[in-house]
Each structure stands twice: as C-alpha cells, then as structure tokens.
Amino acid sequence: MHDGTKIKACASGDTFRREERIRAHLEKAREQVKQMGDPREAEEVGPRVAKARQRAAREKGERLEKALEELEKVRALKSSLEEKKEARVSMSDPEARVMKQSDGGFAPSYNVQITTDGKEKVIVGIGVSQSGSDYGELVSAVDRVEANVGQEPGQVVVDGGFTSRDNILAMSEREIDLIGSMGTGNSQSAGQLKRRGVDPSFYPEVFHYDTASNTYSCPAGKILRPHREEKRSGRINYQYRACATDCQACAFRQKCCPQNGVQGRSIVRGVDAPEVVTFIAKMETDGAKKIYQQRGAVAEFPNAWIKHKIGLRQFRLRGLAKVGMEVLWAALTYNIKQWIRLCWRPQWA
C-alpha cells in the first residue's frame, strides 16, 4: 500500500524571491565574508565567535547559490516567458516547493512518500519529493521497495493521485498487479462545457457514434467526420469535427457551440491501450474493490501516526538530504512500534 503526504518545510512563504533579489543578497553575503577576514585575527570578539560568524555568513552565501540553482529547475517547468520571469524560490530553504495542503491552503512543503506492507503494516520504503503531484512518484517508490527488501512487490495499492495511464503501463511492464481508483474525467469535461456555454442536451455523450462509417452524428442530425488524432501515453484521442457551414446555419448553434465562430463543433473519442482497458475492467470486479477498501487503514495510518504521535507536521531541518533524514528517523520509530506489536509483545505474552 502506498501513499503520499505533504509536510511543511522549515521556511515561510515570504522567503520566496525572484532572481534579482537573490543575486543582491548573494553579493552582500560574499562581501560580508570578505570583510570578516581571518577569524584568528579578530580583536573585538574571540576567535571562536568570529569563526562562527564567518561560517554562518559563508553558509548563507552557499544557500543563496543553491537558490539560484533551484530557480533554474523551477523555470524549466514553466511554459511561458512571463512565468519564467516571475519564478521564485525560498532563500532559507531553496529546495522546498509551494504545495497545496489538506486544509486547502498553500505552504512551502515537501512531498513525503511512504510505502507500507499490506500484511504486517510495516513501512518498507520512504522517499521525499519536490513535486506537488503524486503521479510521477509511484515508479521510484517501487524501486525503493525493491532495493530495501530485495524484490519487487507483487501488488501495489494506491489512490487516485497515483492512478495514471503512465503508471498503469509501467506497472504492467514490470508485471506488478496495480490496484487503484481511476477517475473518468467526466466531471472536468462537463465543467469545461458549462463554462463554454454548451447546453447539456448537446454534451458529447448525446452524440451517436457509427462504427461502420467512423463518424458521429449530433442531436440535430449533422455529421462529424474524423479530423485528427493525438497519441498520448496509454491512450489515443481521435477528434471528429462537423462542417463549419453546417454549424453556422444550424438553428441549435447557440446551444451546441456558442463560442465557436469559425470552425464546426468537435468532439473527442478516446481509445485506451489494452493494458488500461484491462485495468479498468479489473477495478470493476468485487475482488479488486475489496482489496482497495483496505488501502486507507494501511497506507494512510503511518502518515497520520507520524504527524499526530511524533508531531512531524513541519520539518526542523532544511534541504532534501536533511529532510530525508528526519523522515527516516520517523519511519524507524514507527517500525519499532510495529516490531513491539508483532514480535516483542507476543514473545512476552
């Protein structure tokens, strides 16, 4: 059973700055180190105090240099030039990222990934990520389990945050039985159609698909023919479009495509890869549903225990390496408690 949880970083939101401010602070830090000179020659304060001050100033400069490195990573994920220009990182913990919290707010955080054995409830893998999404964390989680216990898990149970077509294909290739919830995307699609002013009587599910001619017909009787296809991981989207003249002259145009002024109405028919089709069919079975029902009690319990019992709601250290050590100590403490439950208490009973 695998799950992720967001834990706040040792940094506040107001420590995030753009490149200009970071470089300005870096220059001041470097100048401060130069002015301090040799701590052994300090007269006003003792050499020990002077050396400590110099080390603090030097570490601040190193942290700001790290901030510039992390800024480039953040920019690489931005699409537009304006977003790249506005990119910011924390000067106190450059490796932290702003993530959405369980209460709906946002805060500098790390994404902690915990894998738990489904039978004995022991943590068998932990990791720390800078990603606010869980989609890309499953493969690395399986790799950590294999490194820790010497073999891949035969089955992995995850929630919807990890259930993507990429992960379905990856687990299928490694012959790992994946159990997870997968949304249909219908609610998101309906929201987009509503914002565009499309009447529910002209939603895609009302259009009729004819297999023989590979065309769609709308409720008004207009024909939508194949226009183009888009290949994605685990899925091919086929787009069908009506003739522009048909839509312009249609009496139902304001209900069907009110914002489409040039082209005809289009809809998309998605065809999943065989592995995805098999996964969706499997998740409809009673056996898969029964296994998935156990996920919350097993996968989410370590997250709650670490936060409530140990109090690890915010890291005390900074940076991925040190944050990873804090998570490791928390997981070891949790596993010792499980060892007491599984081994020590039965032995003395």
Image: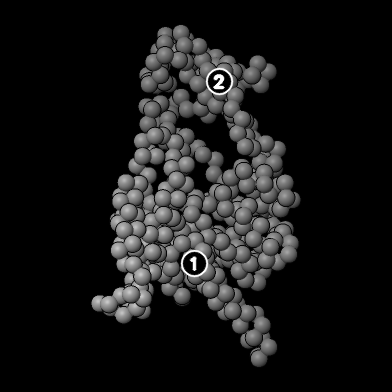
Residue 233 at x, y = what percent? 62, 37
Mark 2 vs mark 1, CA separation in Å: 52 Å
Amino acid marked by disc 1: Lys
The residue identified by callout 2 is: 240
Residue 157 at x, y = what percent? 62, 57
Residue 343 is drawn in which quadrant?
Answer: bottom right
Report the residue that reaches farthest toward the left. 44
The residue identified by callout 1 is: 322
Q: Please name whichever residue, 153 or 95, is drawn nearer the observer in this view of the structure.
A: 95
| Foreground label between 2 and 1 | 1
Picture residue at 63% right of the left edge, 79% below the top: 339
Quadrant of the drawing holding the N terminus: bottom right
Residue 279 at x, y = what percent? 67, 45
- Answer above or below: position of 349 versus 329: below
Residue 99 at x, y = what percent? 41, 53
- Answer above or below: position of 168 versus 338: above
Picture residue at 39% right of the left edge, 34% below the top: 81
- Answer above or below: position of 213 versus 195: above
